[in-house]
Amino acid sequence: MANEAEPRGSVTEWAIRRGQDSDGTALIALIWACWSAYPGIKMDVDGEMPELRRLSTFYGSLGGTLWVAESGGRVTGMIAVHPLDPPTWEISHVYVEPSLHGSGLGHALLDAAERHAILAGAKRLALWSDTRFDRAHRFYEKRSYVRHGPIRVLNDISNSLEYGYAKPVDGVESLDIAAAGSALPRLAEIMIACVDDGASVGFLAPLAPDKARMFWRQAATEVGGGKRAIVAAWCDGVLIGTGTLDLAMAENQRHRAEVRKILVHPAGRRRGLGRQIMHALEDIAMEQGRSLLTVDARAGDPGEALYRAEHWQESGRIPDFARAADGTPHEAIVFWKRLA
C-alpha cells in the first residue's frame, strides 16, 4: 500500500539514503504512524508483511531499490521502486512522518524514485493506494498520476481496497471516467494557464479555478456516458497537455465528431505535443467509426498552424466569432478533415 505524501510546503532539513535491513523496526513504526490516522486499519507484520523486517533485501530481490529519509537522527520517510513488466516500474511504500506533511519530503522521495526508474529505462510508472488515503490521492494526482484499472481487493485483516494509479513518462493516453476525474485538478491548471496565455477556448482570462474544474467535471461525466473523449499528454512525467473530442452528434451526423479543445501548457510547447494529441483524437474517432472531423480555431492562433500542417481543409471564416477580455473581436476559421 502506498500512503502518505504531501503537497509542496516549507523546506525541512533531511537526508535521503539507501535503505538497509537494519531499518526494519523504524520503518514499521513509521508505517504504523501513518496508518493509525485512518479508521479500520490494523497491522500484523509477521502474519501479513514479514518482508518489512528485511525490506531492502526484499526490494533488491525484485531488482528494485529502497530509500529512507532521516531528519534529526530518526527515520521520517521511505519509498521504494521496482520493475514490473518492463518498461513499467512500480512505486511502493511511500510514507512520510505525519509531522512532516507539507514539508516537501514526499516530493523529494518521489523525485528520487522516479528518477531512478527512468534512468533504468522505465517508460511508465504505477502505484497502488488504499482507498482511505485521500491525502495521498491528492498528492499523486498533483504529481500527474491518474486512476488506472479496477479497484484491487487485498483480503487482509484491514479489509483493504486499493486504487491503481499510473502515468507514462512521455506520451498521450485516453482517459476513462475514473482517470479523467482524478486528472481534474491538473487539467484545470492547464486550462487556466492556457487561457491566461491568450488561448481562445471559450473562456476569458482570468479563468477562475472553480469554473475550470466545473468544465472538466462535466467533461468527465460525458466521458462516462460515451459523449466525449479526453486524451492527456505527459512530458518527463508531467501531465502537460490535453485534448477533447465531442462524440455527441445529431442523429443524422453520427459519422462525424468535433475536436473541441487542444491545450498544451505554455511550459510544454514546441515539443510536438499538440500534434501527438491531435493524432490520438483522430485514432479515437476512427475507433468510434467516425469518418469526418470538424474544428474551429481563432485566426492567427497556434491551432491554425497545427491544423494546416496536419492537412485539415479550411471551409470558411466567421467574423466576430469571439471576443477577447478587452472586447476585441476575433475571426474564426472552420476546418474539416476526412479520416481514412
Image (cartoon, rainbow, N blue to C red):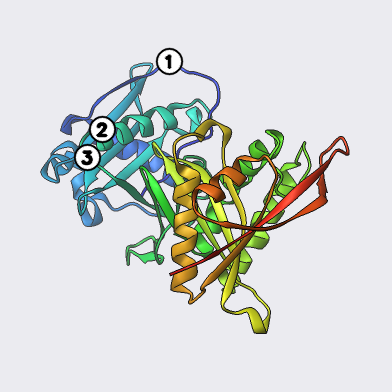
Viewer-nearest of discs 1 and 2: 2
Residue tagged by mark 1? Answer: 13
Q: Nearer the viewer, residue 118 or 277?
A: 277
Q: Residues within 10 Å of mark 1 (few under 14, many from 20)?
A: few
- Residue furthest bottom as drawn: 251
- The mark that comes first in sequence, 1 or 2, is 1
- Relative placement, left or right, of 277 versus 259 is left
- Vertical position of residue 170 compared to residue 286: above or below: above
Q: Secondary structure at mark 2?
A: helix
Q: Amino acid at mark 1?
A: Glu
Q: Residues within 10 Å of mark 3 (few under 14, many from 20)?
A: some
**Alpha-carbon distance for marks 3 and 1?**
31 Å
- The mark that comes first in sequence, 2 or 3, is 2
Q: Nearer the viewer, residue 246 or 49?
A: 246
Q: Amino acid at mark 3?
A: Gly
Residue tagged by mark 2? Answer: 116
Residue 304 place in picture, x, y as percent: 61, 46
Q: Amino acid at mark 2?
A: His
- Residue furthest right as drawn: 327
- Relative placement, left or right, of 132 versus 184 is left
Residue visible at 51% across and 35% down in the picture: 269
